[in-house]
Image (spheres, rainbow, N blue to C red):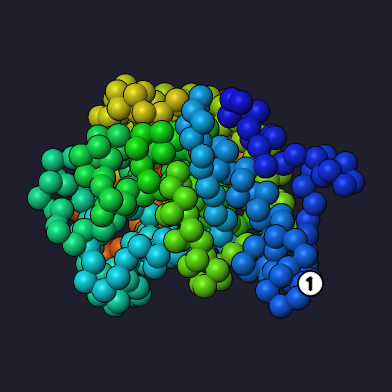
């Protein structure tokens, strides 16, 4: 089945007993056993497994499965994207291990690993080097004997830099080094890391997969049954699992993922072109533009360019604030991937956990604006941006 069909059907077969077309919401926290250790069905306790969550996990695994292949994929669902990330890191890393991570990474991921106010896995003795994955040569000198994980964001948040996933997986992936790709910005509709050689695809399902800004969640998919079982053990032990209703809401969003992603991209492409020609804009960053330094890579490893873009305003922080305070259709808010258009200021909002020096080195300046382009009418959105830029 093609991905649009899998989005609607995979893991969501009608209930054989009742004929219900949509998956049931199973709210039970626990399940009956015939005798100790012999459950009536496949479930014992909802943290360990739940029918509604299982349907979501199968559905997402179907989305990430390489097109036209019989590859078996395995999904796990979490209560948030960071819940998924935390569980992966606990499952794969031990004291004195080393990992590599995209330098321009989501602020929450950075905080979890080495953030100034948290220092999560750094406190547990895990070393991390942040590398510009767009420059693959910079990886070569960073690999160590104790490197266990390469964490890739592609495109990155918020500067939309891309890594050549297939090349990195081919060159550096091995039994001892796991390649994990945060695929949140593209969703499985536009990019499938497992088909490019990655071991794990990771999502904040809060974003495009859920798609309606009304449920928080996370997920991962892997082709390896052994890796799946290893991480599933930690999923149960750490307990960052989603509620059945959240799973239902996420599956409801997945039904329309393909049509939404097409509209997100169509609008983003029009807006990127408008901004690139605007006198108040210094630079636009969008993989679909020929001006993007990795436009050819984007065309090679993605089937579309997504709904995320960033741009630098001319001026300084006062001009950025005035712009953000004057948008009308774009809502000033964190998160992304919903049907509505959002705008945010990375330096103050999503990436505030980075030091000022780190933000400057990466290019996350006071004039950088990030847009999550929704599915409204593109002309209305452009008119809104134009009047805010004039302000």
Q: Please tell me how crowded label 1 is: few (under 14), some (14-19), or many (20+) other residues with Cα within 10 Å.
A: few
Q: Is residue 101 visible?
A: no
Residue at 80% x, 40% y is: 14
Residue beneath disc 1: 34
The N terminus: image quadrant: top right
Does residue 279 appear to the left or right of 240 in the view shown?
Answer: left
Q: Residue furthest left?
A: 141
Using the image as rendered, state which of residue 273 and residue 191 is in the foreground: 191
- Image quadrant of residue 120? bottom left
Q: How many marks?
A: 1
Residue 279, x across and y down, in percent:
35, 29
Is disc 1 placed on a helix, strand or loop? strand
Q: Is residue 221 visible?
A: yes
Name the spot of residue 22 as percent of width and height, x first: 79, 43
- Residue at 69 percent across and 34 percent down: it is 8
Q: Position of residue 16 (x, y in %)?
A: 84, 43
270 and 229: which is toward the camera = 229
| In this view, 104 is above or below 31 | above
Q: What residue is drawn where x is 57% and y is 56%?
A: 77
Give how far across and how far down residue 222 sits, in percent: 45, 47
Q: Going 66% across and 56% down the picture, which residue do you hit?
A: 53
Looking at this view, name the residue that lies furthest to the right. Answer: 18
Check the image and report above or below for 257 versus 23. above
Q: Quadrant of residue 315?
A: top left
């Amino acid at each position: 089945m093609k991905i649009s069909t899998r989005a609607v059907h995979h893991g969501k077969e009608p209930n054989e007993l009742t004929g219900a077309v949509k998956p049931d919401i199973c709210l039970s926290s626990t399940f009956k056993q015939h005798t100790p250790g012999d459950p009536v069905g496949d479930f014992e306790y909802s943290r360990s497994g739940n029918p509604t969550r299982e349907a979501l996990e199968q559905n997402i695994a179907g989305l990430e499965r390489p097109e036209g292949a019989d590859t078996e994929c395995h999904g796990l669902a979490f209560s948030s994207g960071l819940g998924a990330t935390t569980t992966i890191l606990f499952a794969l890393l031990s004291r004195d291990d080393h990992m590599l991570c995209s330098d321009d990474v989501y602020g929450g991921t950075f905080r979890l690993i080495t953030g100034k106010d948290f220092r999560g896995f750094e406190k547990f003795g895990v070393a991390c080097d942040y590398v510009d994955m767009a420059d693959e040569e910079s990886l070569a000198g960073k690999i160590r004997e104790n490197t266990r994980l390469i964490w890739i964001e592609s495109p990155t948040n918020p500067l939309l830099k891309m890594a050549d996933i297939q090349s990195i997986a081919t060159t550096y992936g091995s039994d001892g080094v796991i390649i994990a790709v945060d695929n949140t910005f593209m969703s499985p509709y536009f990019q499938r890391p497992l088909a490019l050689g990655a071991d794990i695809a990771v999502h904040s399902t809060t974003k495009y997969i859920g798609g309606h800004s009304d449920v928080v969640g996370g997920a991962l998919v892997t082709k390896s049954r052994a890796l799946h079982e290893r991480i599933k053990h930690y999923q149960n032990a750490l307990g960052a699992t989603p509620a059945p209703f959240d799973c239902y809401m996420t599956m409801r969003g997945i039904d329309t993922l393909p049509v939404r992603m097409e509209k997100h991209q169509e609008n983003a492409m029009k807006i990127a072109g408008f901004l690139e020609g605007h006198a108040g804009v210094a630079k636009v960053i969008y993989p679909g533009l020929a001006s993007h330094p990795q436009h050819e890579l984007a065309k090679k490893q993605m089937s579309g360019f997504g709904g995320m873009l960033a741009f630098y305003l001319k001026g300084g922080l006062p001009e950025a604030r005035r712009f953000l305070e004057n948008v009308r259709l774009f809502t000033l808010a964190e998160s992304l991937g919903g049907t509505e258009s959002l705008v945010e200021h990375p330096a103050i909002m999503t990436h505030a956990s980075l030091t000022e020096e780190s933000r400057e080195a990466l290019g996350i300046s006071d004039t950088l604006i990030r847009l999550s382009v929704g599915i409204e009418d593109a002309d209305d959105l452009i008119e809104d941006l134009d009047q805010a830029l004039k302000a």
